[in-house]
């Protein structure tokens, strides 16, 4: 005979959401920090003109300068300098590791 003394399953979804939300928030802020180091700087406007959002299970870093895409992707006059994509590639393994650790605790 099995006797259940405590049932934590009803609280599990909110616990998972909170832990994953923290991991995503950290990853988004890490992407912004890593990108800051790789962002080309002439005036500093591109580096400083960004919006960072981490809301629940999603997050983003958005560079607001109208020329951010031209710097990142390049033009026919200048080569690409993919500071954002490089930052995501550097941070992705740590986010993946965090999510695997969360999975291991379930």
Image (spheres, rainbow, N blue to C red):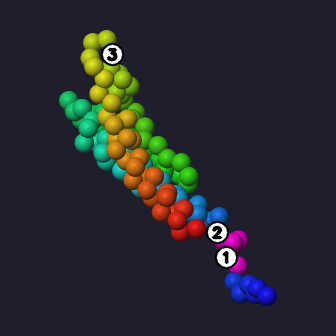
Dividing the image into 4 quarters, which one contains the N terminus?
A: bottom right
Residue 8's disc number: 1
Q: Are marks 2 and 3 in contact (CB under 8 Å)?
A: no
**Percent x, y of residue 34:** 30, 45
Asked if one can make out residue 28 in the rendered structure from this viewpoint, the answer is yes
> Which region of the structure is painted magenta?
7-11
Residue farthest to the front, as pictured: 1
User: Is residue 10 one of those drawn in magenta?
Assistant: yes
| Gap in angstroms between the C-alphas marked 2 and 3 | 49 Å
Mark 3 or 1, which is nearer the eye? 1
The residue wearing badge 3 is: 75
Q: Which mark is residue 18?
A: none
- State which tag comes first along the sequence, 2 or 3: 2
User: Within the image, what quadrant is residue 17 found in?
Assistant: bottom right
Residue 10 lies in quadrant: bottom right
61 within the magenta span: no
Q: How many tags in the picture?
A: 3
27, 95: nearer the viewer:
95
Q: How far is mark 3 from mark 1, CA to CA?
A: 55 Å
Instruction: Determine whether label 1 and label 2 are within 8 Å by CB.
Output: yes
Label 1 near label 3: C-beta < 8 Å? no
Residue found at x 37% / y 47%: 91
Tell me the SS state at disc 1: loop
**Local secondary structure at mark 3:** loop
What mark, if any, has residue 12 been given in the picture? Answer: 2
**Label 3 crowding class (10 Å Cα cut-off): few <14, some 14-19, many 20+?**
few
């Amino acid at each position: 005979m099995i006797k259940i003394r405590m049932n934590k399953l009803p609280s599990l979804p909110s616990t998972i959401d909170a832990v994953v939300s923290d991991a995503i928030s950290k990853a988004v802020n890490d992407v912004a920090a890593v990108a800051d180091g790789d962002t080309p700087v002439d005036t500093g406007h591109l580096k400083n003109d960004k919006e960072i959002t981490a809301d629940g299970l999603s997050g983003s870093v958005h560079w607001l300068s109208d020329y951010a895409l031209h710097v990142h992707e390049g033009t026919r006059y200048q080569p690409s300098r993919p500071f954002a994509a490089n930052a995501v590639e550097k941070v992705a393994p740590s986010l993946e590791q965090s999510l695997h650790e969360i999975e291991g605790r379930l």
